[in-house]
Image (tube, rainbow, N blue to C red):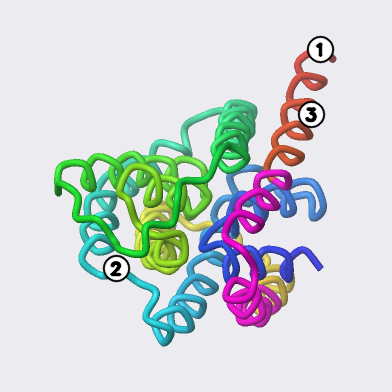
Amino acid sequence: MAGGVVGFAMGALGGGGGVLAVPALVYLLGMTPSVAATASLLIVSVTSVVALVRHARGGDICWRTGVLFAGSGVPVSAGAAVLSGHLPAWSLTAAFALLAGVAAVVLLGTAPEESGVDVPVRAARVVGAGAGLGAVTGLLGVGGGFLAVPTLVTALSLRMRVAIGTSLLVIAVNSLVALGARLATGPTAVNWAVVGPFAATAVLAAWDGRRVSAALSPVVLRRAFGVVLAVVSAGMLTDVTLAAVR
């Protein structure tokens, strides 16, 4: 069930897999935040590549912007992935919850107009946005698509559907780099009996998500995902607060 939701979100919205996978792995399957982050990166990496192929066939990817955006986040993502192993679990959970809340506010806000064309943007802006997203990916174990899509639309002026496809390219690169950095720093226990079926279900659902993305209004997609993120954020912040009080 959780894998299906993760894959559907990535196929339909170009992101959201990690921000949904990490809470599911922690709260439903009992993993620690650090182990869940590694498992999430593995799941998101596989799912994003599959979803990327589907979107590429539809021509909904701005390759130049996507490569530059993703490439600028690679070194930052690797460094943040190493750093995350030295931070307390509660701080990662709290940061994750706050970030999900910010993304929810962005997605629930007023959607920019669909211009019909992709407006050229300065390379410096793309690099800066990509580096910030790389830090989030490496530190928290998410692909960053829930932030990449709003950034590509609002800051880099891509149309919503192209932003969704381009986001998957960024997610695939950042997730694979962060996963490699985590695995390179030492052995990480991956429960393949859990992660395998989770990833397989996510991959299958990603194909369905792409079909829904093509049929529904971008505004409906944005706001539906925003509501999900708001619920996830509120739940995780409540859990961290209660743990601190005990």
The numbered dot on residue 245 is 1
The numbered dot on residue 239 is 3
**Image: magenta residue range:** 201-228
- Going from N to C along the chain, the mark reached first, 1 or 2, is 2
Q: Residue furthest left?
A: 123
What type is the residue that disc 3 sits on? Asp
Q: Position of residue 40 (x, y in %)?
A: 58, 58
Q: Alpha-carbon neighbours of circle 3 within 10 Å: few (<14), some, or many (≥20)?
A: some
Cβ atoms at labels 1 and 3 below 8 Å apart: no
Q: Secondary structure at mark 3?
A: helix
In this rendering, would 19 be left or right of 1? left
Q: Secondary structure at mark 2?
A: loop
What type is the residue that disc 1 sits on? Val
Instruction: Quote the CA–CA distance across marks 1 and 3.
Output: 10 Å
What type is the residue that disc 2 sits on? Cys
In this rendering, would 238 be left or right of 76? right
- Viewer-proximal residue among 30 and 24: 24
Tell me the residue that label 2 is attached to: 62
Position above or below: 109 against 27: above
- Residue 206 location, quadrant: bottom right
Cβ atoms at labels 1 and 2 below 8 Å apart: no
Q: Residue at x 65, y 45 (%)?
A: 226
